[in-house]
Amino acid sequence: MKYYEILFVFIVLLGAFQLSYSIFRMTIIDAKSRHFKHPHFWGLFTMGRNSGNLILYLLGRRNYPSIMSLEDQQKMDSYKKHVGFALVFIALGTISLIISEVLF
């Protein structure tokens, strides 16, 4: 593996870690606003390897109203931006890795 391929893999992993952490923090904020017991558990639950856990959480929370403060809404918006940046990192790293494999 060449040095630039290692860099591209690192960029993808950095984006994946940021995406996972942002979803974890957003879930904690949402679970606290809905007064769920053990919001950190729900954060870890949605951070799993498959997206089924996140879908289960999103389906299960529909019956509970959210009472989110303005500060929590601002944090949530910040984490949404972090998710966008993480997806850009993952996409750019993956595309660069594929191009480097095809061309070189």
Image: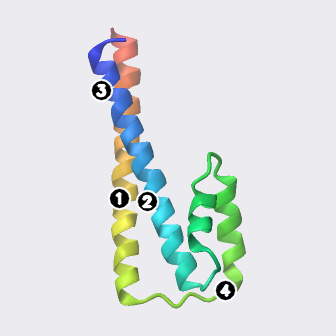
Q: Nearer the viewer, residue 38 or 18?
A: 38
Estimate the spatial distance between the alpha carbons at disc 2 and disc 1, rounded to whole Å.
7 Å
Q: What numbered label is drawn on residue 82?
A: 1
- Residue at label 4? 64
User: Are discs 2 and 1 less than 8 Å apart at CB?
Assistant: yes
Eye-nearest disc, 2 or 1: 2
Estimate the spatial distance between the alpha carbons at disc 4 and disc 2, rounded to whole Å.
22 Å
Estimate the spatial distance between the alpha carbons at disc 2 and disc 3, rounded to whole Å.
22 Å
Q: Earlier in the sequence, mark 2 or mark 1?
A: 2
Q: What numbered label is drawn on residue 22?
A: 2
SS under mark 1:
helix
User: Are discs 4 and 3 less than 8 Å apart at CB?
Assistant: no
Q: Earlier in the sequence, mark 4 or mark 2?
A: 2
Estimate the spatial distance between the alpha carbons at disc 3 and disc 1, rounded to whole Å.
21 Å
Estimate the spatial distance between the alpha carbons at disc 4 and disc 1, rounded to whole Å.
26 Å
Q: Nearer the viewer, residue 38 or 56?
A: 38
Q: Earlier in the sequence, mark 2 or mark 3?
A: 3
